[in-house]
Image (cartoon, helix red, strand yellow):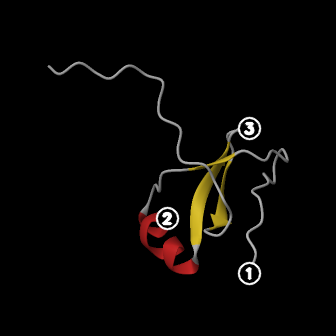
Amino acid sequence: MSARLFECSNCGGFSGYRSRPRNFMEKFVFPLLLLRPVRCGDCSRRSYQLTFVPARPRRESKKEPRAAL
C-alpha cells in the first residue's frame, strides 16, 4: 500500500496537521480503524484520514503560557 499525500476535501490544500483527539471515538475506536483526525493548515477544516497519509505534527499554540497563581 502506498502512502498518498494529504489533500483537503474543502479547499484542496496540501498542508495537513495532526489534530488532537476530542472524544471517545477519536481516542479509542478510530485508531482501530486506522483513522486519525487531521486539520487543514489553509482553511482549518478538520477531517479524518488514514494513518498512512503523512501529516505534520501539531502546531503549538502561539498563546503565552499562563502564570501560576
Q: How far apart are marks 3 and 1 (CA)?
A: 29 Å
Q: Which residue is drawn at 47% across and 30% down?
A: 61
Quadrant occupied by the N terminus? bottom right
Amino acid type indicated by mark 2 = Glu
Of all residues, the one furthest to the left in this rendering is 69
Amino acid type indicated by mark 3 = Cys
Residue topped by disc 1:
1
Q: Distance between the residues labelled 1 and 2?
A: 24 Å
Q: Which mark is residue 43?
A: 3
- Secondary structure category for the residue under label 1: loop
**Would residue 12 be found to the left or right of residue 30 on screen?**
right
Q: Which residue is drawn at 46% across and 55% down?
A: 22
Q: Residues within 10 Å of mark 2 (few under 14, many from 20)?
A: some
Compared to residue 69, the image places residue 61 above or below, namely: below
Camera-near label (3 vs 1) is: 1
Q: How crowded is mark 3: few (under 14 residues within 10 Å), some or many (20 or more)?
A: few
Q: Residue at x 48, y 51 (%)?
A: 20
Quadrant occupied by the C terminus? top left
Amino acid type indicated by mark 1 = Met
Snapshot quadrant of residue 41: top right
The earlier-in-sequence mark between 3 and 2 is: 2
Q: Which mark is residue 26?
A: 2
